[in-house]
Every structure is written in C-alpha cells, then in structure tokens.
Amino acid sequence: MTIDPFAPARLGPITLRNRIIKAATFEGMTPKNVPTDRLIDYHLAVANGGVGLSTVAFCAVTRDARGAPGELVMTDDAVPGLRKLADAVHATGARVGVQLGHAGPVAAAAGERGLSPTPRFNPIIMKRTKAMNDADIARVTDNFVGAARRIADAGFDAIELHLGHHYLLSSFISPKLNRRTDQWGGDVERRSRFPRQVVRAVREAIGEQVALTAKLNMVDGVKGGLSIDESIETAQLLEADGCLDALQLTGGGSLLNPMYLFRGDAPIAEMAATFKPWMRPGFKLVSKRFLRSYPFEEAFFLDQARRFREALTMPLILLGGINELTTIQFALDEGFEFVAMARALLREPDLVNRLQQGSTSGGTCIHCNKCMPTIYQGTHCVLVPEGQRPGF
C-alpha cells in the first residue's frame, strides 16, 4: 500500500501533520546557552515551510555536557525561551521536539575534559577523558531526568535522546570506545545498560504525553567500532524495554568519523579556521584521517536501515541525504514510518511545502558541506544570500 507522505501520522502519543521531520542539527544560535529570538526564527522558517516536526539541537543536560561552547543547556533559565519557541512553532500547525544528550568524549570541542566509558586521549585539548564511575553514571542519569522534565514543562511535543555519533551514550554502546570489564562494559547487553537506564528513567519522568525517540548509531564507521549486528541487538533490547516511540537510524559521528554521517565533500580548510588558534595544530594533525571522503548518494543509509526494518517492529525514522520526493515515497513504502531531512531544509526551509504543492520534485542542496563550519556562528547554507537565511 502506498503511504501518503503528507497525510497526518502518529508518533507515539502525538500526531504530526505529515511524515517529514526536520532532523536535529546544532544551530549555533544560543551563545549564552539559552534560546534566542534568532533560534525561534530559525525553527519558524522550517515550521512555516511545512515539516511535521522540527527538532531543536543539540541540548546538553548540563553545562559540562556540551559538545560546543554555544549549545543549549537544559537549565531552569532555558525554560521560558523554550516555551516561547514551542508556542511559536505550534501556531504554524507543526510539532516541536528537542534533541537531548551528553557530549561525553566529544565535549573537548567545548573546552571540557569530557566523560567516557574508558579514558581516551584527545589531541585537540591534549587531555584524557575521565572514565565514569558508578556515581557519575547515577548523576548523569539524574541530569537527563531533570532536563527531560524541563522540556516537557516547556510544552514540547517530543524528546530525542542522543544515542549516536560517539556522544556519551553512544560511546558506551561502542566496543571501540567502551573497554570496561564491569557491569557497564563487555557484551552488547552490558554496553547498552547505561543508555537503556537513561531511556527508562526519562520515559518514567515524562510520562506518556510526550513522544520519546532516540537517535542510534547503526555502525561507528571505524575499524573495531560498533557493527550493524551489534547495533541491531541493541535496538532489539531498546524495543523490548518498550519506552521509545521510534528510532532514528544514523552512523559515524563527531569523535571518530563525521563524514560517514554527512557524505560528500570534506570542508577541511573551512573547519580548521573555526577552531581557536591553540586548537588548530591538534585538528590539523588528525584532519585527513578524521574528515574522510565519502561520495554522496541519495538516502545513503537506506541499505543498512533495511536490516533494522527487518529485525524490528517499532517505528523507524530514515535519515541520510534525503532530498527527493521519490526517495521519501520509496522509504515510506518500504516500511519506514518517517523520514528526517537536514541539509536540504537548511538550503530551502520551505521545501516540504513545495514538494506537497508539486512545484518541485526535490531540493537543491549540492552537498558541499560548507554548512558544517558555520555551526559556531549560526548554522546556515553558504549558498543562500545572508538576508534570506532563517534566523538571520
């Protein structure tokens, strides 16, 4: 049966006006770690542009959980601005969610030492991460709970827990990053124990009125990293826990292999220029290995995601270079309940409306990835004139 991508669809306890989600991408519009009018305008652009759900990102559970200096931190001070953002998006008919997480070993980009399952040297800050003990795990779980409650109190419709991209919860799942021999490391069940604990605790805290999803790595994209078989096993454990309304499938990540997630051109020179002078030597030391080159292809995660569709019954969200209406339709007809778009909407915030109206069959993003280095000044497509950029 053909699924209409523009018809209303259920995501757990909420209904979206269509099956297209604006994926979480760090906006770089919160220099004081609280929402701004600029951030609201950014999400209003894609909400007015037709998406069913717009996802605010990245929101750190505490200040030391940031992956970049200007990220949102889910404190009491952030709630009034979040409530204003939620009300504004709701007025357009769209829903709004927050991507919530802890950067873990990726926190070096924010100048933090970072937490991780096992110590790891970071050449950018020339320090080793702190291996978490049981007290740290309990504290961070509580941090997730407190942050999730604030998001729900601010009137948001959905929370996406970040279990991908080598951030803290992802690093516990990864055999390359988690070398522990206690209850938090070893086989798949033990490596997934902490992330599952967080998922259960957040679900209990927010109840059944807010949709709860997770972004999960299918693979780490590096030798010795998470394999697709291990990730499927992790996903099956999460499904059995019954706390999530959907999984968004991804791969690679900020710590080990970011271009596995983006595909297309690697903007090495532009990225180096964004670092503080004292951090640039460390970045240049690892840049060629860090920013690998992968050719772009439409829906580049589809083949891997099919294996999850075969192994799971829970709703799945397909991510990864989705620009064309035919791709959206194909993904839905294959059994994926939703699709998530990022760079295509950065180039054209009104793309969903134009797809629905039939005025275009696809987006005009060229996958140059020069939007990546803009994240610290306000994430935007460099090909869009300054006066036409959402949030500017």
Image: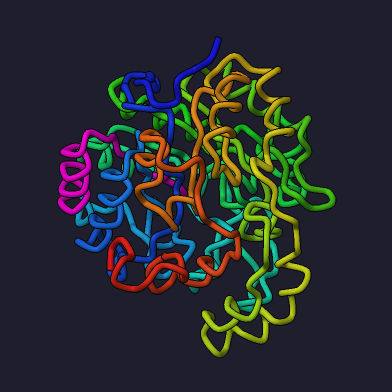
> Is residue 327 or residue 35 the one in the foreground?
327
Image coordinates of residue 127 in percent, x first then y, are 63, 74
Image coordinates of residue 372 in percent, x first then y, are 53, 66
Question: How many numbered marks, from 0 up?
Answer: 0
Question: Is residue 58 visible from the viewing direction of this image?
Answer: no
Query: Which quarter of the figure is the C terminus placed in?
Result: bottom left
Q: Please, which residue is most extreme toward the top here?
A: 1
Image coordinates of residue 240 in percent, x first then y, are 58, 16
- Asked whether 89 falls inside the magenta stretch, the response is yes
Question: Is residue 326 visible from the viewing direction of this image?
Answer: yes
Query: Which quarter of the figure is the N terminus placed in?
Result: top right
Q: Please, which residue is most extreme toward the front here?
A: 359
The residue drawn where x is 65% and y is 60% is 255
> Is residue 383 or residue 24 the one in the foreground?
383
Q: Identify the image's colour scheme: rainbow, by chain, secondary structure or one colour.
A: rainbow
> Is residue 82 or residue 291 the one in the foreground?
291
Q: Quadrant of residue 282?
A: bottom right
Left or right of 39 on screen, residue 330: right
The residue drawn where x is 72% and y is 42% is 219
Left or right of 30 on screen, residue 362: right
The residue drawn where x is 41% and y is 70% is 69
Q: Please, which residue is most extreme toward the bottom here?
A: 277
- Asked whether 210 falls inside the magenta stretch, the response is no
The residue segment tinted magenta is: 80-101
Q: Quadrant of residue 211?
A: top left
The residue drawn where x is 60% and y is 44% is 320
Image coordinates of residue 30 in percent, x first then y, are 30, 65
